[in-house]
């Protein structure tokens, strides 16, 4: 009887472990852990005004990258 319980626990443990590993891999592929700047911005910028400036700066950088990509695509055509 004890052997059956141990095999059941082993099977359940393996299934749960692989499920958690699968969820972690899925989250990494979806980009859930890509925000490395968030904590640094929180440390560097204390006030809400400073945080808003940092957000605006990131948005401006993103827009510049998009414009650069668009202009590159237009040149290729």
Image: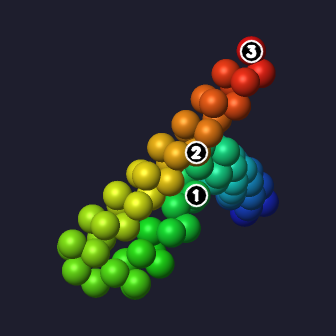
Percent x, y of residue 10: 74, 58
Using residue 76 as the reference point, say whether residue 43 is left or right of it: left
Percent x, y of residue 2: 72, 63
- As helix, strand or loop, the secondary structure at mark 1 comes to loop
Neighbours of disc 1 within 10 Å: few (<14), some (14-19), many (20+): few
Image quadrant in which the N terminus is located? bottom right
Residues at marks 2 and 1, CA–CA distance in whole angstroms: 18 Å
First in sequence, mark 2 or 1: give its number: 1
Q: Is residue 12 above or below residue 6?
A: above
Using residue 1 as the reference point, say whether residue 35 is left or right of it: left
Percent x, y of residue 59: 41, 51
Residue 58 has which mark? none
Residues at marks 3 and 1, CA–CA distance in whole angstroms: 33 Å
Find disc 2 in the rendering and name its residue: 65
Is residue 74 in view? yes
**Residue at x-position 48% and y-position 43%:** 63
Residue 3, picture quadrant: bottom right
Residue extending farthest front: 75
Find disc 1 in the rendering and name its residue: 34
Q: Is residue 61 above or below residue 41?
A: above
- As helix, strand or loop, the secondary structure at mark 3 comes to loop
Neighbours of disc 2 within 10 Å: few (<14), some (14-19), many (20+): few
- As helix, strand or loop, the secondary structure at mark 2 comes to helix
Is residue 16 in view? no
């Amino acid at each position: 009887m004890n052997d059956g319980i141990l095999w059941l626990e082993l099977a359940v443990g393996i299934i749960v472990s692989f499920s958690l590993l699968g969820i972690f891999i899925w989250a990494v592929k979806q980009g859930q852990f890509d925000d490395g700047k968030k904590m640094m911005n929180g440390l560097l910028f204390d006030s809400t005004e400073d945080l808003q400036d940092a957000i605006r700066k990131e948005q401006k950088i993103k827009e510049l990258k998009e414009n650069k990509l668009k202009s590159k695509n237009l040149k290729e055509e």
